[in-house]
Image (cartoon, rainbow, N blue to C red):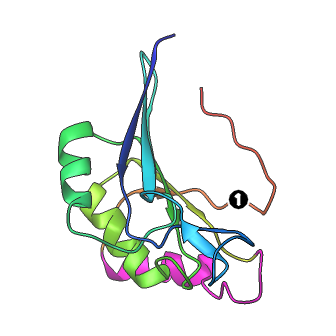
């Protein structure tokens, strides 16, 4: 079917490592997330690496997100509490946490995220995936 992909804002640094720069980094472009709309299928919001920002409310209002992939690592991105607030802003049917547990500095956990969702009274369905696990939506 028809698929539309929209590049949406994210709040994150963006640099590329290089040996040709005095600091070893060069500007890497605008950080972003993706809104993927599948004809006769779900609308998916992949936040990308980002912190919380209020325009996430607009994404939820304008696009009626079915599935939201939200970072919860708490280093370089949102942690569980801010991610729960992002989910509250967007109001997806289903939320899948990502960008956690792969490196020691990423201290956010799915359990903390779930607690934060409950505290924020979020009604989205939480899908807990193990690292490397695949899920199919039909």
Q: Residue at x 57, y 69 (%)?
A: 26
Q: Residue at x 71, y 69 (%)?
A: 18
Looking at the image, which residue is at 45% across and 59% down? 31
Location of residue 55 (image quadrant): bottom left
Which image quarter holds the C terminus?
Answer: top right
Indicate left or right for 63 with 133 as reference.
left
The image shows residue 35 at horizontal and vertical percentages of 40, 40
Q: Bounds of the magenta span? A: 102-120
The answer to whether residue 137 is above or below residue 125 is above
Secondary structure category for the residue under label 1: loop
Q: Nearer the viewer, residue 136 or 45?
A: 45
Residue placed most toward the observer, 96 or 74: 74
Magenta stretch encompasses residue 42: no
Q: Nearer the viewer, residue 23 or 50?
A: 23
Q: Is residue 118 visible?
A: yes
Residue that label 1 marks: 129
For residue 40, above or below residue 9: above
The residue depicted at 38 percent of the width and 62 percent of the height is: 10
Q: Is residue 54 above or below residue 40?
A: below
Tell me where residue 129 appears, x and y as whole percent.
70, 59
Q: In this rendering, does residue 122 appear at all? A: no
Q: Residue furthest right?
A: 132
Please tell me whether residue 111 belongs to the stretch shown in magenta.
Answer: yes
């Amino acid at each position: 079917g028809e698929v539309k992909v929209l590049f949406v804002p994210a709040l994150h640094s963006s640099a590329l490592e290089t040996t040709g720069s005095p600091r070893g980094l060069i500007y890497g472009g605008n950080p972003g997330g993706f809104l993927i709309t599948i004809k006769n299928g779900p609308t998916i919001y992949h936040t990308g690496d980002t912190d919380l920002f209020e325009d996430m409310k607009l994404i939820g209002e304008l696009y009626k997100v079915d599935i939201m992939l939200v970072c919860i690592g708490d280093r370089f991105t949102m942690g569980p509490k801010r991610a729960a607030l992002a989910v509250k802003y967007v109001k997806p049917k289903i939320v899948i946490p990502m960008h956690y547990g792969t490196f020691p500095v990423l201290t956010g956990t799915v359990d903390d995220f779930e607690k934060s969702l409950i505290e924020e009274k979020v009604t989205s369905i939480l899908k807990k995936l193990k690292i490397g696990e695949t899920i199919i939506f039909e």
